[in-house]
Each structure stands twice: as structure tokens, then as C-alpha cells.
Amino acid sequence: MTVRTLRTTLAAAAALLALAACSAPSDGESGDGDGGGAPGGQDTLVVGIATEPDSLSPLLGYGKDGNSKIFDGLLRHDEELALQPALATDLPQVSDDGLTYTYALREGVEFSDGSPFTARDVVFTYETVLDDGTNYPYKDELDAIESVRAEGDHTVVFELAYPYAPFAERTVLPIASADAAGGQDANTGPYNTEPVGTGPYVLTDWTPGERISLRANPDYWAGAPTVERLTMAIIPDDDVRVTRLRSGDIDAAVLPPSLAEGFADEEGLVTHQAVSADFRAVTLPTGNPVTGDTAVRRALDVAVNRDLMVEGILQGAGRPAYGPVPTTSPWFAEGTERAYDPEEARRILDEAGWTEGDDGIRERDGLRAEFTLWYPAGDRLRQDHALAYASDAREIGIDATVESGSWEVIDDRLAEDAVLSGGGNPADPDFDLYGLLHSRLAGDGWNNMAHYTNPAVDEALDAGRRTADRDARQEAYDAVQRELADDPGYTFLTHIDHVYVMADRWDGVTTQPEPHDHGLGHGPWWNVESWQARA
């Protein structure tokens, strides 16, 4: 299939889906959309993003990877993703055995309500998120913590149960106010929608499904931001974000590469492209008799034309994906690339007893080789990936029926239907691999959605997590990637460069290597508090 054929196929299929997918969400907004000033000024920024958080409390996971705007962590990432001090005065002191991390804290920092920031707030934050009664969805990421204690007001000490090499990366977690968030249910209390932090911005309004409006914190410890009003307009539909950007209703937006291309020559706008670890993959649930068959998984893994997806769907803004670790990462296991080989895919299915029927779809023992593949409605990139994947699957006699729906609908189908999923974090391979593949997290929310189980993978993931030795970690993660090539629980398709189009009115705008999440914190506005209005 050529790029032109792929684009034609996607366009035709998308048109048919659009007629059927009446459930595609609309942002339902009109007017200025920022709740505090129209876009277009140098002291305001209105950004169109695709998703919004369920909560604005770090106790429930908000801002866990940094750049939360309302909060600060002990550490932060710079432009190159290197760790820098934030609420800590320096990087942590680490004991020789790798089990004790000591942080000295800044003095004179205040929360937005005027209360002082101290070590007590750090202890409160970590103890609360680790409490069994708190619905913090990423507890496994902090599994190494045995205890956290304050030594006076300005020193915090973490004791680990085992050496965990990337622990410092986990301390970009935003720090909540013990006074403001304590004494209430962390899962349902008002702090979730009325956050108090030490960050460069303060929440002024949150209309769920529409916008999150922030104003600059004039007393921010690192200096008051020049951009005084920051609004995130919640616009799930890619095409609606394009329309609102073109009309001047918003100043910036994250867009699929094919839609961003239409702004290439637009006066007053600039395009930023951020390298990311963000992958697109198809979950292959073990509970489904078709997708749970190893032969089907292996066949699909070599039947997909990843290079064509990168060229035809991403307009070259990305790379083929063979697992969650990008090919550009130093942690990528060389030799685990899989070539596009539909003939090999047919051979695998033939040997496994999947025979082609009169309609070209295979079956075995009366079971038809078919399954449903979901993607979230309004997400053009996932739609195009799903359609291309289904087309490649059809070529080898497997019928993947593409459906769109809300995440609420999709969530109920995860155990039996395939989903065009996304994920990825460039900070450390443990962040990519553990939650996605470890069997103990199978079906745990958005972790291990494929219910993947492989004892050798579990063993290697535990080994990589529990040592600080770089060579031992490389060996462990190489083993994970080789096992995943032989026993795929997902079909990994592409790693996507994030593309943003925005008004060209500020100096200091840059991008970072980005994780899957790109919304409030990730994008060219990751350091908006440091921008300067252009004269």
C-alpha cells in the first residue's frame, strides 16, 4: 500500500465512521472560552487541550510528572529533562547503599493562601498518596518508599525498601498543603477542586468539560510570571480545536500532524514539534479467544506497516514503535525491531491452524478471527491508526472492526475488546514498562490493559526496578524487550512527536522531551512562567 492509498483509505473509512459515530463529543463552548480575558494579548494565553484531569489534587495524581503550574515538586525538569531543584535547594544526598535520600528545603516559600511551606507538607503528601485509603492510581510508582520523615522544618528524609535508581525522578511529584488538604477525605474533599499550592499560578475557575482558568501568583518564590492569565480550554475533538485556533478563539493547541500542516503558512502562528516517548499501540486482551492467541498476536506484530503509518499518518513526525521504549532511547534493545512481513504473518497463522474462509477471514475450530478495536471519539490520530491497523489485519485474514466511543464506554470493554491505547515516559524505562506489562497490575485501571502475563517479563521488571547498577538494569530491560518481541501482548505501532500550533508573541518558548500526557503541563507552555512578552 502506498502513502497515497493509505490516506485515501483512511479518509474514506473516516467518513463512514463519522456518519455512524454520533457519539463523538463536542466541546460545547462558545464565546471567549477563557473565563478571564479574551485571547490575543501578551499577558494572556488560552490553550486548547484534548483532555482534562479528574482532579487538581496531587494526592490523586494531578501533575505527578511535573509542570503542574499550581504546585511545585521537590525537583523539576529542565528543557533537556535533567533534574533541577525546585522546593528543594539542591539535588538529594543519596547514601552509599542507595536506600536513603535526604532533601534540604527552601526557606521562606509560601502556599498561595499565605501559609508557610515546610517539611511537614512533604511528609503529608507522600504519606497520604501511599495510604491504602487514598485512591492514588500510581502507588506502584512509589513502591520503593519505606518511610518519609521530617528533620526539622527544612529537611526531609526518604528511606527506601530497596535501591530504586530513578527515585529522584519520582520527587517531581507536586507537594500539597497539609493545612489546606488535611482533615478531609483525600478522595472526595474540596481540595480536589480548590487546590492550594506553591506554584506559579493559582486556580480562579474550573468548569469541567469546558475550561480551567489560572492567574499568575504574584508572590511566587521564583518571581511572578509575565503571562498573567493562563486558560486551558477543554476541546476533545481535534477538528474543533483547529476551527477555534483558526478563528482566534484560542492562542495555541496540540494538533495531529496532518491538521497542523494546514497552519504552516499562517501569519502570526508558529509550529513547535516536541520529541516524545508517546506511543500508540493496540491492546490484545488475553481474555479474548482471538486476541489472546499467541499466534494471532505474533502475526499482527509483523503484519502492520509501521513505516507507512509514520509517513502517511504522522507526516514523518514520529518513528516506528516496537515496544514502549523508543528506538531513540539508550535503553532500546537493538535487534528487537520487527520488519513488515505479511507473508510471514500468513505463515504463522497457517501453522497455528487458522484457515482462510470463503470471505477471506480465517477461522479455527469454528472460531472466526475477528475482534473489536476501540478508539476514543474525536481523536483523529487514534482513529487513523486504528483504521490503518484494521486494513493491515484484513490483509492477513483477521477482521478488526473499528468502533469509537467515550472513555467511559471503552473502560467497560477493556477485558475483552482491543483498544488503540497510548502511553510512554522518557524519564526512565521503569516508568514505561512496569505498569504496562507487570502481571500484578493486570486490569488495574489503565495499567496493563491487555492483562499481559509473562513470568520472565515480571522477573526482569522486578530486577530492573530493584537495582541501581546501570549495566544490570540494561540487561533486565533488554530481556523485557526481547520477550515482548517473542510474546507480544500489544501491537506497538508508532512513537509520536507532539505538534503544537500557537501564536508567535512570546520569547522563551521551547519544548521538552515529552511523555504521553500533553495537556496542562506538557507542551511549549511547560515553562510559561518564564516567558517574556515580545516587544
Image (cartoon, rainbow, N blue to C red):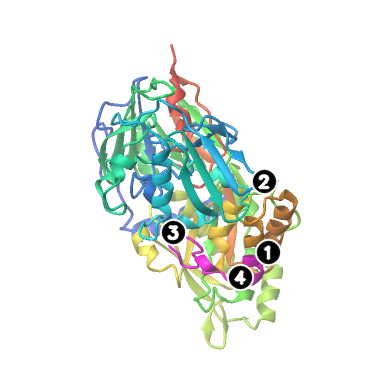
Task: Tell me the residue that label 4 is attached to.
Answer: 297
Q: The magenta stretch spans which residues?
A: 440-460
- Disc 1 designates what residue? 485
Q: Looking at the picture, which amino acid does disc 2 mark?
A: Ser
Quarter of the figure that contains the N terminus: bottom right
Q: Residue at x 64, y 49 (%)?
A: 326
Q: Secondary structure at mark 2?
A: loop
| Nearer the observer, 336 or 448 | 448
Q: Secondary structure at mark 3?
A: strand
271 versus 325 height, above or below: above
Q: Earlier in the sequence, mark 4 or mark 1?
A: 4
* Sequence-earlier tag: 3 or 4: 4
Calculate the distance from the C-alpha at mark 1 to the C-alpha at mark 2: 17 Å
Q: Residues within 10 Å of mark 4 (few under 14, many from 20)?
A: many
Q: Amino acid at mark 1?
A: Ala
Quarter holding residue 533: top left
Tag nearer the camera, 1 or 2: 2
Secondary structure of residue under mark 4: helix
User: How far is mark 1 from mark 3, CA to CA?
Assistant: 24 Å
In the picture of the structure, the residue carrying the numbered disc 2 is 329
